[in-house]
Image (tube, grey):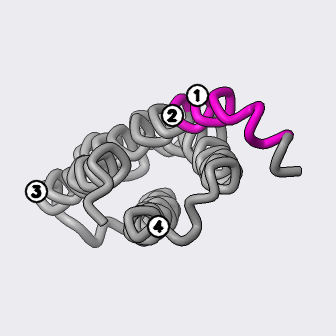
């Protein structure tokens, strides 16, 4: 199995990076959708369009991309034998955090679809910074490998 993984390492790595880009794009878009959704009139046709857009983003881009990121990332780590590397453990911790954030976004979109609006637009705009900060740390961990 390791021989197969090592010969396909570059393809695994490319696929991983591609799906990271898709996932991150969705993680940046969905909170912005929430802001626009919350600014729409409750019960309006516009609100329904935001509910539909949010569901499509979750089902077509976000969740499939997150699954691909995890699968390809774990295979890539196996291909290079990185399991004992400290930088990988830290990266996995941050990716786990982003996965939790993803789950929170999915739950929040379902609340919005039910008509609940627990957060302000300002708080949603601040939460939109979470994936960017996590991505910066993850890139540093992967490229610099500080430990």
- Label of residue 85 in the image: 4
Of marks 4 and 2, the one in the foreground: 4
Of marks 1 and 3, the one in the foreground: 1
Residue at mark 2 to residue at mark 3: CA–CA distance: 31 Å
- Label of residue 122 in the image: 3
Residue at mark 4 to residue at mark 3: CA–CA distance: 39 Å
Mark 1 in CB contact with mark 2 (< 8 angstroms): yes
Q: Earlier in the sequence, mark 4 or mark 3?
A: 4
Of marks 2 and 3, the one in the foreground: 2
Span highlighted in magenta in the image? 4-18
Quadrant into which the C terminus falls: bottom left
Residue at mark 4 to residue at mark 1: CA–CA distance: 21 Å
x then y, percent, for residue 25:
40, 35
Of marks 4 and 1, the one in the foreground: 4
Which residue, as the protein is rendered here, is positioned at the far right?
1
Q: Earlier in the sequence, mark 2 or mark 3?
A: 2
Of marks 4 and 3, the one in the foreground: 4
The residue pinned by badge 1 equals 14
In the foreground, 11 or 94:
11
Mark 4 in CB contact with mark 3 (< 8 angstroms): no
> At 16% from the left edge and 51% from the top edge, which residue is drawn?
125
x then y, percent, for residue 106:
51, 60
Residue 37 visible here: no
The residue pinned by badge 2 equals 17
Mark 4 in CB contact with mark 1 (< 8 angstroms): no
């Amino acid at each position: 199995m390791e021989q197969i993984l090592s010969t396909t390492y570059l393809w695994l790595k490319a696929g991983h990076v591609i799906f990271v880009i898709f996932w991150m794009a969705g993680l940046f878009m969905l909170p912005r959708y929430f802001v626009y959704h919350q600014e729409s009139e409750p019960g309006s046709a516009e609100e329904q369009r935001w509910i539909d857009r949010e569901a499509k983003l979750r089902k077509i881009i976000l969740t499939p991309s997150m699954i691909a990121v995890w699968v390809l990332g774990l295979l890539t780590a196996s291909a290079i034998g990185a399991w004992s590397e400290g930088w990988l453990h830290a990266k996995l911790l941050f990716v786990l955090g982003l996965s939790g954030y993803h789950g929170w976004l999915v739950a929040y979109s379902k609340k919005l679809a039910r008509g609940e609006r627990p957060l302000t637009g300002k708080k949603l705009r601040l939460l939109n910074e979470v994936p960017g900060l996590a991505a910066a740390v993850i890139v540093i961990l992967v490229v610099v490998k500080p430990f």
